Amino acid sequence: MKKLINGVDTVVIDALRGMAAAHPSLRVDLDNKVIFRRDAPRRGKVGLVSGGGSGHEPLHGGFVGYGMLDAACPGEVFTSPVPDQVIEASKGVDGGAGVLHIVKNYTGDVLNFEMAAELCADESIEVASVLVNDDVAVRDSLYTAGRRGTGATLFVEKIAGALAETGAPLADVARIGREVNERSRSFGVALTPCTVPAAGKPTFELGDTEIELGIGIHGEPGRTRTSHRDAREIVRLAMDAIYDDLPLSGETLVLVNGMGGTPLMELYILFAEVSAYLHEKGATAVRSLVGNYVTSLDMQGFSVTVCRLTDELTRLWDAPVETPGLRWGR
Amino acid sequence: MTTAHEEPLVDTPFFLAWIEEMATAVQVERDRLTELDAAIGDADHGANVDRGFTAVRQALADGPPETPRAVLVLAGSTLIRKVGGASGPLYGTAFRQMGRTLRDAPEVTLAELAVAFDAALAGVQKLGGAAEGDKTMVDALAPAVRALARAVQDGSKPEDAMAAAAEAAAEGARATVPLQARKGRASYLGPRSIGHEDPGAASTALIFAALRKAAG
């Protein structure tokens, strides 16, 4: 394993020190491991808190700032944060209008946020939650932990964050977050596994000519393994899986997301194919994002997330945002 | 451990010894647990439980509790607060529920311990929603809890009851190999989760092996 780190046990805290040094718009609490917006809490504004395992950067810490999250709780690599972190974050962003927890549907995240929400209630902090579960690779049934939360998390954080910035009440901010999740679907493909620093070796093995379809964002293997093929065919596999679950038409917001080790050039090649696919189905990508946003350490691969827009969602997507990972209009 | 004629008793030093054995066992087996998790999960189970029990060891050293109840509640809350992932809340809840079921006395009977283990299982199942056969820690925990209860009913000595629980947990963990996961991260794999031992069941088996060791 070759990584640019000081030691496997300090990767999270060392990265947080870097965030603190690089972004004066953030206040990083190194003891509790919480990244705050410097001006939190904002009186009368719903506070948005998200969190999850580290290794998905810029998610979530890179999305803390005006128009998006008020705080993020990074756990250990690929491990959910602990309730103490979420409670500290919630306390620190509560401006009297309540706190929204944005939680990706992974058992660990769900359990730790649930425990934190209960303890917040004991301290009279009003908490609502949005569960993100956009990944169509997992069948949502009694026989699985349910669909995972992946790329749509960014959409939920951006759009709910924009609405919160207008002073909307907690129930409305939660409702729009759920609406974004319901209108979004994702599918991921890996060319290589990733290497968790503490494990020191790749999380699974994949042959030179194999790809893994239906991956999540924690280096876990996917739904099936198949032979490698050209970008057009891979996009068709991914988009068919999405389309089968949510027929696409009209205006969409599309994220073509790199998993951390994929050249941007390849992501644009994929985006061209996604755009052509949508066109063929009578849909258009009127808003788009191409880059590394919801990553899985050094994995090579991508995920594609599509959200069926409404006028309201488009307006909120376009609203100003100023975070380390996403900024426009301000 | 104290062994009275009628009512076998388990005391605070026993619980401290148990946790010490647990912390050692997960440290020694850290890489194996992580490898099991890498096969069907996300390769962090060994690191997580090791970090958790190291924190528990530290918390107990900082202020050694005086009753089994206090030992277990402190261990549980430390795991909830320090571990993260699914294993933190699940193991944390198990120990906390165990502790909360016990009287706040320096010694508890083996029968009371069996009841406490039952509460641990109920807490884990309520929080995680898993049933036996879902390929989770419950597949090791449930048979171990049953074996202990049976041994107590049969009037076994504590060390024999705990050995029976350890056997049952190990057997339960091994029996997860052919199962398809229906809960937790391995469930994403569907049929591909078959053929691997569940890492949560494996760490639960270690916890019961530690119980047997602590009983001497």
Image (tube, coloured by chain):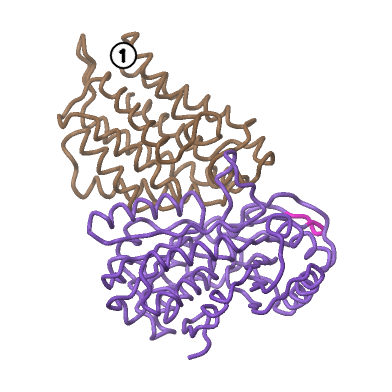
- Residue sitting at 57 percent across and 65 percent down? A152
Q: Secondary structure at mark 1?
A: loop
What amino acid is at disc 1? Lys
Residue A160 is one of the magenta-drawn residues: no
Query: What colour is chain A?
Result: purple
Above or below, A2 against A108 in this view is below
Q: Position of residue B87 (x, y in %)?
A: 44, 45
Q: Which residue is mark 1?
A: B157
Residue A207 is one of the magenta-drawn residues: yes
Q: Which residues are magenta?
A: A206-210
Chain designation of label 1: B
Q: Position of residue B68 (x, y in %)?
A: 22, 33
Q: Position of residue A239 (x, y in %)?
A: 74, 62
- Residue sitting at 47 percent across and 56 percent down? A79
Query: What colour is chain B?
Result: brown
Q: What secondary structure do most residues of the magenta stretch adopt?
A: loop
